[in-house]
Image: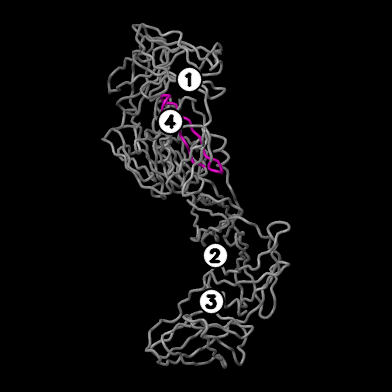
Amino acid sequence: MARAVAVASALLAIVAITTAITTAGETKMVRFHATARGGDLPSSVKLQLRSVADAAVVREVVLQSGQAETSLVGAEEWELSVTTPGWWLLPRQIATAPDEQTVDFDLWPTGEVTGVVVPASAGGTAPSEIALTVERISGRPSGAGEIPQGTRFTCPVDAQGRWTCVLPATTVDLVLRAPAMTPHYRWDVAVADGRPTDLGTFRLRPGASFVAYLDGDTVRLLTKPARARLFRPVGAVASETAARLALPVAEAEFTSRGWVQLALLPPGTYVLEVSAEGFAPAQIGSIEIYEGKESSFRKAIALFPPLRVSVTVRPPVDLGEKPWRVTWNRVGDFTPETASIIAYTNREGVATIENQSPGAFHVQVDDVNRNSVHSSDVRIDGPETAVVPIRPDLLVVKGQVVQGEEPLAAELRFGGSDGAIGTYVRTDEEGAFETRLPRLGRWPVEVRNDRGVGTLLQVDVERDEDLLLRIPDTSVAGWVVSESGERVKRGSVTVLVAGRGLGTTLDDRGEFRMNGLPAGVVQIVGRDRTTGDSSEFVRLDLREGQPRENVELRIERSRRITGTVSSAGQPVVGAQITAAALDTGAITKEAVTDLSGRFNLLLPVRVRRAHFTVPAPSRTLQTFDLPLSDQPIVLDVAASGGTLIIRSAPGATTPYRVRRNGVAVHLPSLLSWMSAHGHPLTDVENLPVPNLAPVITKSAPPQDA
């Protein structure tokens, strides 16, 4: 018992009495008064006072019927403990004071707690000692005199793994800890006065763990156990690696007292999701897990009733008198994306989204033909913000499509195929069309038909004006061949027009033809869908009335670029990497890091240098300009950064061209990064880029979409 008290005294810092300095040699009286916390005090109990300044200086005091007094000399601090077997007091420090003082304390009868620890591996040896620590994460109130949380008892372990500890006789929550092992929790352990309490066998397991608990109100309202799941934050890359990383690393149910332990965790950064029937799910991050350590979220987690979000659309029906289609998605935190919620408006134009928790969301409104008339980010913080009003100002737009002097039947997509907002319409045989748009201004319009026309026009839409969409009389045709000169049968061709790609697939002869492309210089590239390799970008000067025939696009051999992403000396899991090949026009390749922080991607052999954009979840977004070789590359991202505000003139639209230290930032990665941090992208005049690596940044003026 004396050893346990000595160790506990060394580890606890408990302030008991206000200290004061007295004149050297001055004697002051100290009285002691003890109260038994269980049973009756014996006629005499021995106390020990040990000097904090000099451990060799020890004084003994004997309590008679719980009372004693002694004199202390000089300005010293003393550690107070009990040496009579069968009794324990909470280690504390006292100090000599200017006046006489009385020290009140509790004495506890003791009992033994025993158990057996089994080594982590067969043939292994048990540790020489374990520690029992008092816990109070159960949410029970702490009464005066109870054993404080964190009080520690060190217990020796024999060769057979059996251990014994002397503890105060009371009911207590305990944690058994051994170095680099997952802690074991035992609740409501009744330590009996003078009798051993056997806690049984503990199998030691090496590894990290995580502990959390619910607040008392939530526990009382639960009808079924709540569930905890730990996810890795993962970059927005569609790949098998990203899909595997998006699965929960660990999950478990909370106990009846609202406590959960997730064990045997690999080190890294995580997001905690807590869900329960009748409550909105809660997400907490970032949570750091360290090798062989226990992490905890000591603040009680409160769950709240789910929010009901009402999306109100005016007018209440589309122009065909049909309900609006509302698509609702949660964004933020780099957590795995939940499935989209699809809802339709009622007669009053209201779509109801159930079971939502506070956070950032994306809402899109389509008509019955899946034409998108509204797309925006919103934030819901509580019931007072759970109504989302949407008023698409739909304008009637009429016009005709012609090529040369002849009408042209075609399919039109206002906003382009990759636009967030747009309208699809098919002309009649005379090229005439009528559609509705949610705004005036400049629109990219993609035009296609079954005669090979594929082009992108920039059209200014003004109120009360019929549009004439004139398709240029241009054409380009050719084929795609492999590196060895053989025709590629499963492939595609993409033409870059005003920063956007127009694509077509190869026919069964490996040939392609595209008509109506804008006159002027364009870039064209071929891809082999089987291997993922592509050709060099070829520049063509297209002119009306002068077809370009027999264009050959030769696939280039690729090489595998490997590397790792790290931060503060640790591998970063789930980081997105986008490589822009500087020598091949606009080719970009994406990858995501695995459990070791490694990645690989394919780039043409002739590429000697690339720009890398790395949004690393729970770290920073950082860019790199690096030469390429057969050696693995290392992308070391900063652990923390600052916020960049991209400001633009009123009415400006994306895309932006952003450079960091002269290195172009991949725009989709940038927008995804902002969205994952819960920042709405609707205010294009003030776009915040959070956690940007701390270097000089520049942004070029925005370009029209």
Residue tagged 3? 9
| Residue 204: quadrant of the picture | bottom right
Neighbor class of circle 1 (other Cα within 10 Å; few <14, some 14-19, many 20+) is many
Q: Which mark is drawn over residue 172? A: none
Instruction: Give the secondary structure at mark 3.
Output: helix
Identify the mark nearer the N-term, 1 or 2. Answer: 2
At label 2, the amino acid type is Ile
Residue tagged 2? 137
At label 1, the amino acid type is Ser
Residue tagged 4? 609
Residue tagged 1? 535
Callout 4 touching callout 2 (CB < 8 Å):
no
Identify the mark nearer the N-term, 2 or 3. Answer: 3
* Mark pair 2, 3: CA separation: 23 Å
Left or right side of 481 for 692: left
Going 49% across and 28% down the picture, which residue do you hit?
Answer: 603
Neighbor class of circle 4 (other Cα within 10 Å; few <14, some 14-19, many 20+) is some
Q: Position of residue 658 (x, y in %)?
A: 34, 35
